Image (cartoon, rainbow, N blue to C red):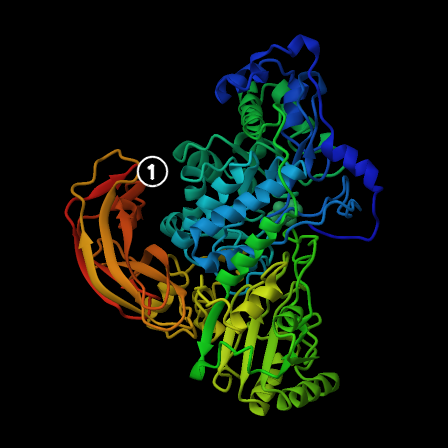
Amino acid sequence: MTHRLAFALPAALSLVASFSSTRPLASEENAAYLDKTRPVDERVEDLLKRLTLDEKLLLVHADSKFTTAAIPRLGIPQRWLSDGPHGVREDIGPHDWNPAGRTDDFATALPVGVALAATWNPDLAKLYGRTIGEEALARGKHVMLGPAVNIHRTPLCGRNFEYFGEDPFLASQMVVPWIRGMQSQKVAACVKHYALNNQEWERGTIDVEVDERPLREIYLRTFEAAVREGGVLAVMGAYNKLRGQHACHNDYLLNQVLKREWGFKGLVMSDWSGTHDTREAALNGLDLEMGTNEPYDQFFLADPFKRLLETGEVPMSVLDDKARRNLRVMIETGALDGRPAGSFNTKAHQQTARRVAEESIVLLKNQGSLLPLDPAKVRTIAVIGENAVRKHSHEGGASEIKALYEVTPLEGIAARVPQAKVTHALGYKSGRWSPEKPPVSADAETLIAQAVESARQADVAIVVGGLNHERFQDAEGSDRKDLSLPGGQAELIRRVAEANPRTVVVLVSGGPVDMEPWLEKTPAVLQAWYPGMEGGNAVAAVLFGDVNPSGRLPMTFPRKLSDSPAHALGAYPGQNGTVRYEEGLLVGYRWFDTKGIDPLFPFGHGLSYTSFEYANPKVSAPGPASPGGAKPTVAIVEVDVKNTGSRAGAEVVQLYVHPKAPRLPRPPQELKGFARVFLRPGEQKRVAVTLGADAFAFYDPAKKGWVAEAGDYVLRLRSSPRLGRFELPFTLRKTLEMAP
Ligand code: BGC
């Protein structure tokens, strides 16, 4: 639902709409709800009792594409929601998907969600959330529609680039600080899309069938962390169905799990036009209907809802609960109190964008240490590829940003080595994916020939390829058709690498692409994701060694699509409107490990320009875990990590837990801890990773709760699940059961 048309509203009009403020009537001025020294609950209850039925109803549905109505007599302002997960989107509407035509909504464009996940750096995630929070404040937004945390079930999902990869532990570790960072700015985060929006194919109707354990252990885990640990204030329902019922009004997901089990006190909003039924929306836990059109009062949670309330078919307490949740978020975001000014397009924000991009880039391959390039020695560089000059931040669907600027890889490289001769050849045109188009057309042949010639004449060739946000690539509303690189890039890379053995490939994409046709002949490959407004500078910094790459893959790169679980089992995209998650728990590396399939690059993989050695590993148990404690520590794993190379760099120590004799089937190993450590040449640090009971736990459907079973485990310390380092035996002496 993110169509962009050329029509623009006068800027002044939308400015007024965005920053309008409302003063309460004099009669309300001393009311408890306006007293910011009082507890939030008290303020909410006080305000709730002053609202009429119609005013309460105004709180639970939209009055434009991204707002809810003001209630001026009580000082309730129009509430502003905004996409998205990678920065504050340009203003839309108000009553259509046209850009509002403002000139003050250029913003900081951060690298995409999957890039952030590839940093494995929770501190950076916090800064990322905070950065968007500061910009949201400055733009008058109360709720930001992110982070987006659906698990990568298939590499083809069109929105994988927004999400945090295939592992719920890694995603949780990144998302919790993201939310805290944003909400520290009095801006509500809205974690989305709850739940199981793991494909764009038929996203509005597809019915997901999934067993309870994978639902809990894989697909809900990150949402649970967002709620329980991150204290997220808003949750967005997904378009798809779960077990026959739409996720936006799914009793199990919303009432039973989110609100009852997890104790969520914030608001659930629909995805845009994701509501389909008034009674279900009323009774099954939806608190705010969004994505409707004029006349707004005719949608599900407006007049039709009022009729159910007036006839007594739905009790008033249901509306009160929804209104209460909306008021809570309003008060938590300072909407009634005057909010801080925030800050916008600052140097610090741009530096954050650059840092995230630099730390996210994954060095996949570096044969013969071709990288880093020596800036003093390189005289001619052939930069090749559409993505060397293409900007991506302003595309991609709901996550698009009207970037203040975006440095392309070509610009970044040229700026880094001003003394070198840098040429550019397009090499390919990706265009739109079309099954009819032959991979190498006549035009493509000319582009390749020019690129090959430029490569032949240069000291080094850098092909910047990959995908973009066109339909059937990394785009909302459609999935990829396969793993192939569009526009005949496979042929291009193969021939460039043949012409110049010093060829580096830089991939811009939200996930794996097919590299089989050219990888063997290509000495160096970088995975750069969509690196945001500072992307070109970050790519250049890594290529020339100013930055030592430290990104790690947040998903498995398969050799071929049919190696991936959903595809191996024919369980994507589903049949007759239903997709059954046949692979159960075996998503991503859990499948590759179980089946002994060799991936192209494993989850957690990422090379460095230096080398690290691990020594003296130790496991200790700090004594019996105290029941009822927030997250009691069960084991502490320590290891010495030393930088044995000649460049400073960061290593990511990864800890996988292997249960030796589980009562129920479990994946052979799961990531349960990691630590990022920065070391100068020769430097050594003792790194500690702590494990709580949850690191050993699985979801036991019979008990309807999490259980960490007593027994023997192996704690595997390594720099990716496939690289052996240390296997440390550990015995959990007592079974620990955790409340659901
Ligand atoms: C997307 C959401 C987005 C919303 C508002 C929907 O189509 O799925 O992620 O926040 O539109 O743009």
- 382 or 379: which is nearer to us? 379
**In the displayed structure image, the side of residue 237 where residue 260 appears, left or right:** left
**In the displayed structure image, the side of residue 87 where residue 613 appears, left or right:** left
Where in the figure is residue 38, as x and y percent of width and height?
50, 17
State whether residue 330 is above or below residue 124. Answer: above
* Residue 276 visible in this rendered orientation of the protein: no
- 574 or 609: which is nearer to us? 609
Where in the figure is residue 311, as x and y percent of width and height?
62, 19
Disc 1 designates what residue?
A: 740
* Residue 549 visible in this rendered orientation of the protein: yes
Quadrant (top left, top right, bottom left, bottom right) of the C terminus: top left
State whether residue 239 is above or below residue 485. Answer: above
Where in the figure is residue 436, as x and y percent of width and height?
70, 77
Circle 1 — which element? loop
Residue for point 33% across, 61% down: 653
Where in the figure is residue 556, as x and y percent of width and height?
43, 67
**Picture quarter containing residue 681?**
bottom left
- 448 or 614: which is nearer to us? 614
Q: Determine whether the beta carbon of the residue marked 1 sits less than 8 angstroms from the nearest atom of ligand 1.
A: no
Residue for point 61% across, 23% down: 337
Q: Residues within 10 Å of mark 1 (few under 14, many from 20)?
A: some
State whether residue 40 is above or below residue 401. Answer: above
- 555 or 14: which is nearer to us? 14
Amino acid at circle 1: Pro
**In the displayed structure image, the side of residue 690 where residue 580 appears, left or right:** right
